[in-house]
């Protein structure tokens, strides 16, 4: 604690044995002369602060006794021991021709000291589910939340509008109480918040009819949350000032912490910034090749299925995955091709597959020596159905595709 370097009695111009009324009259007289709203001369504001500090110490019996003993705190006002906490300036300045609440820069100075004593509201957590499309594009999402908010009718005081507060009888308006006990020959002191007035130093007899004296009411609110590109499951976003209200009037609210949850998408499987999907293609499309439309996070994509595609083949689409958080990089889309084998065939389909198998077996068998054919057999071959001719053509295409694939391998 710094040493005393000011004489508060000299500042107010009163003797050391002056009573409370004399000290109060001296302060009112000097405050009226040096109040910043009335005295615009240089140094008037500093002089006014000095006068107010002197009165704050000498008007409090405990602080005055400590000052007289040479243990009082100097001109520096600390947040831990606010010497102005026990002064009702609105009462002191009443009748002087101006309102202390409009004391300009000095009022701002005093309110900062008061705010240092107020407690901040508690933090609040909530979960928000977003889609893969939002992860890929970023943007805004709306969080629906039910939470306590400051009552608009009483503005958090809990009092009926128009009712004047009364000084708390337990803490005498300080908002704090001093607990004292003896331990091992030492006197222990602890400053705690007054439970009766919750640290406000004031109490209201009539309660607000809307919040019933609580100062808060629960409301359903919608809060806009900014989702960054590449957000990951479990990521926590902080929204300042959107937590629970402060239990102290005029105190700062807490913060809201939003935990992101990525909704499952039956179309895709996420692997980091890459996406995997499965497509099912018929046998003939895998053999002959085709084009299919597949979903992506942007718009449908026409994918080429090459001729001769084998089961479980994985095709890669570059930069169709998710963006990486904090970097200018995007993952890929992997497409796993699965072949559909029909379980039931119509008679026509079965005949075609039988003919295809016969053609395949005929090509696979070693060639027999040529033999002479009769005119009757020649006529039968010429009269073969167009379906068989189609099957042979398909087999030729398959054979060429397989040979080209083998050469690449």
Image (spheres, rainbow, N blue to C red):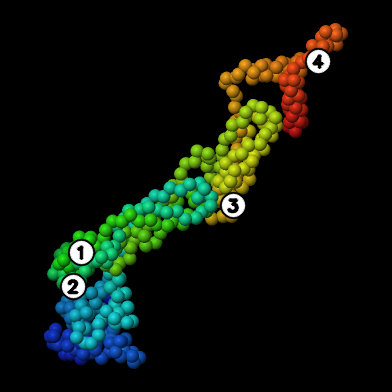
Disc 4 vs disc 3: which is toward the camera? 4
Name the residue rendered at 66%, 30% in the picture: 285
Q: Earlier in the sequence, mark 4 or mark 1?
A: 1
Q: Label 1: few (<14), some or many (≥20) within 10 Å?
A: many
Query: Closer to the camera, 402 or 114?
Result: 402
Find disc 4 in the rendering and name its residue.
382
Q: Give residue 321's position: percent from left, percent from top.
A: 57, 46
Q: Give residue 368's position: percent from left, percent from top.
A: 82, 11
Find disc 3 in the rendering and name its residue.
329
- Circles 2 and 3, Cβ within 8 Å, touching? The answer is no
Q: Label 4: few (<14), some or many (≥20) within 10 Å?
A: few
Q: CA distance from mark 2 to mark 3?
A: 62 Å
Q: Earlier in the sequence, mark 4 or mark 3?
A: 3
- Circles 4 and 1, Cβ within 8 Å, touching? The answer is no
Name the quadrant containing residue 208: bottom left
- Circles 1 and 2, Cβ within 8 Å, touching? The answer is no
Q: Is residue 147 left or right of residue 321?
A: left
Find disc 2 in the rendering and name its residue.
164
Q: Earlier in the sequence, mark 3 or mark 1?
A: 1
Residue 208: mark: 1
């Amino acid at each position: 604690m710094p040493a005393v370097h000011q004489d508060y009695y000299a500042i107010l111009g009163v003797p050391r044995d002056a009573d409370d009324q004399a000290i109060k009259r001296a302060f009112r007289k000097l405050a009226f002369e040096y109040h910043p709203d009335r005295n615009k001369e240089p140094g008037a504001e500093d002089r006014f602060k000095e006068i107010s500090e002197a009165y704050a110490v000498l008007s409090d019996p405990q602080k005055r006794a400590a000052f007289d003993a040479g243990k009082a705190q100097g001109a520096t006002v600390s947040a831990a021991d606010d010497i102005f906490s026990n002064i009702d300036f609105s009462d002191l300045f009443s009748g002087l021709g101006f309102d202390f609440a409009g004391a300009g820069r000095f009022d701002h100075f005093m309110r900062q000291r008061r705010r240092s004593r107020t407690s901040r509201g508690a933090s609040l957590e909530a979960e928000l589910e977003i889609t893969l499309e939002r992860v890929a594009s970023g943007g805004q999402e709306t969080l629906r939340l039910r939470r306590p908010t400051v009552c608009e009718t009483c503005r958090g005081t809990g009092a009926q509008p128009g009712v004047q507060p009364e000084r708390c009888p337990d803490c005498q308006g300080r908002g704090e109480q001093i607990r004292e006990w003896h331990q091992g020959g030492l006197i222990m002191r602890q400053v705690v918040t007054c439970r009766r007035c919750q640290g406000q130093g004031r109490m209201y007899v009539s309660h607000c009819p809307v919040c019933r004296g609580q100062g808060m009411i629960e409301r359903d609110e919608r809060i806009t949350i900014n989702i960054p590109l590449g957000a990951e499951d479990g990521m926590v976003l902080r929204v300042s000032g959107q937590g629970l209200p402060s239990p102290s009037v005029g105190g700062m609210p807490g913060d809201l912490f939003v935990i992101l949850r990525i909704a499952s998408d039956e179309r895709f499987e996420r692997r980091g910034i890459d996406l995997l999907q499965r497509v099912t293609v018929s046998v003939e499309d895998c053999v002959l090749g085709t084009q299919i439309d597949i979903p992506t996070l942007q718009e449908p994509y026409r994918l080429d299925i090459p001729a001769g595609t084998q089961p479980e083949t994985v095709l890669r689409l570059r930069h169709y995955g998710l963006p990486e958080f904090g970097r200018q990089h995007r993952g890929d889309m992997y497409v796993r091709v699965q072949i559909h084998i029909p379980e039931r065939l119509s008679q026509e389909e079965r005949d075609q597959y039988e003919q295809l198998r016969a053609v395949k077996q005929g090509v696979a068998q070693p060639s027999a020596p040529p033999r002479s054919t009769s005119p009757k057999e020649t006529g039968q071959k010429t009269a073969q159905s167009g379906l068989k001719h189609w099957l042979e053509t398909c087999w030729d295409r398959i054979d060429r595709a397989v040979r080209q694939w083998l050469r690449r391998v």
